[in-house]
Image (cartoon, rainbow, N blue to C red):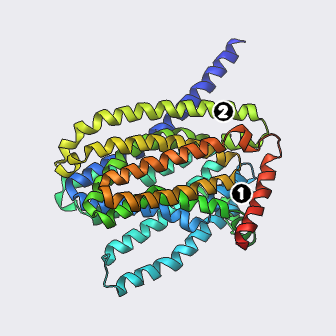
Amino acid sequence: MTAVDNATGFSTNGKVVLRHVLLLAMRGGSTVAKFLLAIYTARYLGLADLGIYGLLVGAVTIMPAIVGFGMTDWIMRKIVDLPRAEALPLVASRLGLTLSIHLIVQPLALAVDILLGEPIPLPIAVLCGAILLLENLGSEAVDMLIARRRVLLAYWLTFLRTGAWPYPVIAIGLLYPETRTLEFLLLGWLGMLAANWVIMIGLVIPEGRWRYLRPRPGSLLHDLRGSLLLYIKDVSVTVSMFVDRFLISIFLGLELTGVYTLFWSIANVVHSLSVNGVLQAQLPHLIATAQSGEPKGLRALERHLQIETGIWALLLALAAAVATPLMLPYLDRPLVQDYLPVFWVILFATLLRVAADSYGFMLLALHRDRAIAAVAFSGAIASAGLNLMLTPLAGLWGASAAYVMTSGGLFAARYALSRPDQSGEASSGADIAETEASRAAVESATLL
């Protein structure tokens, strides 16, 4: 190998490493921002406001699944290698459907709130509705960018949408005590969402990209029919993740919801940095490798990603376990310190969730839509059932135990179903066969 080859190889490797570091830094910045916001809200606004914020975060995550109809993953797999002229109409169709649903449903929801005497104060309801809309659209747009291998841009926009706004909100709140309110927090969130969309609109103007953003209802309906199984998966996954805090708010009140949200936010740093920081960026590569019909290459990539994700998760969990007891006295919330042992249970459950989600990516790459839907639906039922049974009996201990059992069950099921003898990956036509099987399953489900 010549000196030029060595230099070129070093330069390429250096760019890859730098890119990976930037992705982790942006994901880390977003995660740290959410973590600091939870700490700030608990300390200066109160556990009840933190509980309300936690419920809104749950709604922001659940809403894309409910109005998404499973089409996001379905379209992501289709547009990975499509020409721009074919990919952008699919993206426009996807975003257009979400916008239409919000424009119909949100006015109805506000009218119901007014008729019931504003159980949610109207200014808060309007802010929450606007946040739900822009977060939903922003999340889907980022998913499409990742599918198109614009990972760095996607992570940068995600950081602006989710990680940039807490820092000024916290800084202003520390400097000006009168701004330590839930309304100001929501305004800061909404302002950055608006700025994020101004940037995204600016990105489609060069080279006339906006001309391709013409929705195609016909192809959208076809994709909608084929994505039923993924829709079941999306709704089930989000329900299993966030149903606990809604049930805690019903059975135990907003303050204990705030305690649980705080512990969950700290533990979620482990999940976000290890799964979203490592695996999500590699999803297009994982899908392309699975579709290439090379099982050995796919399994080698799987092992590499599992090892890397596992190392990150364990190191981050250790850091969280050490730092959390040292930080809690600063919050001056005795209720939080009383429930510190619950945090260890939630942290263990989060590690199981990391393992479960990593094998979930494998099932998605293998087009195992039926398995994805079945496991996710079972997980949602188990999470809701366990929380309904254990939370009234054992409080936060019961909710955290339900989290452990649900995450452990998801991990075991996804691991078993992603093994070679279960994956149907023996030939290069496996993804086609699985798609046909998925369509048959959709027809069966429709008949039932």
Rendered-image quadrant of the N terminus: top right
Give the residue number, with chain letter if any, for mark 2: 301
The tag earlier along the polypeptide, 1 or 2, is: 1
Amino acid beneath label 2:
Leu
The percent coordinates of residue 415 (x first, y second) are 60, 41
The quarter of the displayed image where residue 58 is located: bottom left
Give the residue number, with chain letter if any, for mark 1: 87
| Residue 188 appears in the picture as rendered | no
The dot on residue 15 is: none
Q: Residue at position x 71%, y 35% from top?
A: 298
Rendered-image quadrant of the C terminus: bottom right
How many numbered marks have been drawn onto this rendered protein structure? 2
Q: Residue at position x 37%, y 57% from top?
A: 390
The percent coordinates of residue 395 (x first, y second) are 30, 56
Left/right placement of residue 85 relative to residue 144 reads right
Q: Residue at position x 40%, y 34% from top?
A: 316
For label 2, the SS is helix
> Which residue is more in the foreground, 260 or 30?
260
